[in-house]
Amino acid sequence: MIDQITVFLENNRGRLAALARTLGEADISMHALTVADTSEYGVVRIIADTPVRACEVLNAKGFRASITKVFAVEVVDHSGGLAALLDALDAAGLNVEYAYCFAIEGGKAVDVLRIDTRDEAAAVIVDAGFRVMNPSELYA
Amino acid sequence: MTGTAERTHWEERYFQAEIETMRREELEALQLERLKATAQRCYQDIPFYRQAFDDAGVRPADLQSLDDLRRLPFTTKQDMRDAYPFELFAIPVNDGRVQRLHASSGTTGNATVVGYTQNDIDVWGDTFARAIAQVGGDEHSILQVSYGYGLFTGGLGAHEGGIRMNSTILPMSSGNTKRQVQMMHDFGVDILACTPSYALLIADTAIEMGYHPATEFKITGAICGAEPCSEGMRREIEEKLGVVLVDIYGLSEVMGPGVSCECQHQDGLHVAEDHFIIEILDPDTLEPVPDGEWGEVVFTTLSKECSPLIRYRTRDISRILPGVCRCGRTLRRMDRVTGRTDDMLIIRGVNVFPNQFQEVLASFPEVTSYYQIILTSDGPLDHVILKVETVPEFDFDEIRRIEDLQRRINAELKSNLQVSVEVKVVEPKSIERSEGKAKRVFDLRGDVR
């Protein structure tokens, strides 16, 4: 499991920029960022270096940030890679709350998944032939 | 954790036991005697009352029993505004006996001005000193007064209570919250007097500063008034600070905080009936309602020298709690004020008091005690937005949890208040923290109503 930073943001002008600036000023490098938005607010999910410190920095600046444990799964970066993984989880009856992908060096893709039945999910992912990545492979 | 069930009660303390536990017949005889004197003085010294008595066809001498009070005319807030500044004073302002003036904010018209003689100030101090005893304090206690000092009666009223009790007073006024916390801790403050929203801000600030005030601070009591405090908010302050919080009531027109106050049993506010007669009236018919039924609170002052009031319509909504309190006081109890007749919001034709929102929110552990109600017009219809903040433990990583919370709060409000609201979850601390009375309602519906 890796640490993802989740930030609750109101839909106000400049909030996302302020967030990015805050992390930048603290010298924290981001590797992935997604925004799930509704009409009123957004939930920003970030993979970054030193996530615990990043969280503290954001909260000190008045953001509402917390750490969420998610799976990072290595997938070969070609068509059908993700489908195979999701099929396996689906076949096991596991519910994926959300998922997103980003690419890393070496032509690989990382799938980030939030699944609350963690132990079971870990077994299914490994049985399906995928590798769950460690924090040190993704961030400092 | 302190909860009602497991709370241990201390041996009751009284500041003026002979009055607070007086037999009802004696108390009522005292009230009648003082009522007659007050009516006489009003008639004699205040032209407004002479006219009002004459118009009502009643003379002070007609007062033969307490029931005759009903024959006397009412005084309204508007009467007090019209009397600006000193026309309702029984003593001329430059007479040498008027020691102090207080005034309401006057945001909706002329300020209402009230004068106090030394005796008026002493009576006021006595009633607040009763509250200090009711929360377990005495002359050995350190009292931190974090109500604003000034024309507002909170700060100086609590201050006078400390003087009469001979407590050690820490006159902080409001503001500079970190310093409030630091001194509360360093000085070993026993009792805090301020608005409930400020008590909560002080508690939260102490926790943010790394303290655990419930166990690390000496404080045991809080006397909070000047704005509504839901039961949930009371428990939150009590648990965070490690105190027993009593609700104190008063209004500047009548005196200031101390007109009534809860005892440690927190089951209604004992009215200082030796200085005030309370009536609960149907606001439409102005006829008395039976004990236990809600209505408008009306006060007649019995001891005030400078600014006596006959049947002042407070527009606050409360009721008399029937029965006798366990504390031994014979002074009757009024319930906590649920709202004001003029704070009442009419939303899509439904009557709602802002603190009803607070009561509903208190049942949701996912949200903090800070909230805002924003009323706008959506064409011909009223639209209500309720802003809430989630507590730090709330897992907002899944949007459906936020949506589910919004849905549940909405459903609960709908079933309790018959009002549909748009619940907005906002960022932490984006709802203004207040050092005085918190502004909770923003009515942007325009001035058509």
Image (tube, coloured by chain):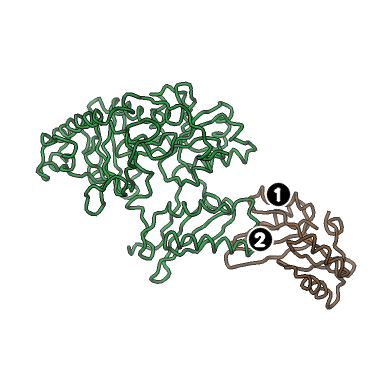
For the question of whether residue B151 can be seen, the reply is no
Bin the neighbour count of mark 1 within 10 Å (Cα to Cα): few under 14, some 14-19, many 20 and up. Answer: some
Using the image, name the chain to which the residue with label 2 belongs. A
B385 and B178: which one is in front?
Answer: B385
Residue under pointer 2:
A16
Which x, y percent locates residue B65?
A: 16, 35
Q: Secondary structure at mark 2?
A: helix
Q: Earlier in the sequence, mark 2 or mark 1?
A: 2
State left or right for residue B54 relative to residue B261. Answer: left
Relative to residue B276, is residue B398 depicted above or below? below
Q: Which chain is brown?
A: A
Dividing the picture into quarters, in which one does residue B55 lie? Answer: top left
Residue farthest bottom in this picture: A79
Q: Which quadrant holds the N terminus of chain B?
A: top right
Residue A57, label in figure: 1
Q: Which chain is green?
A: B
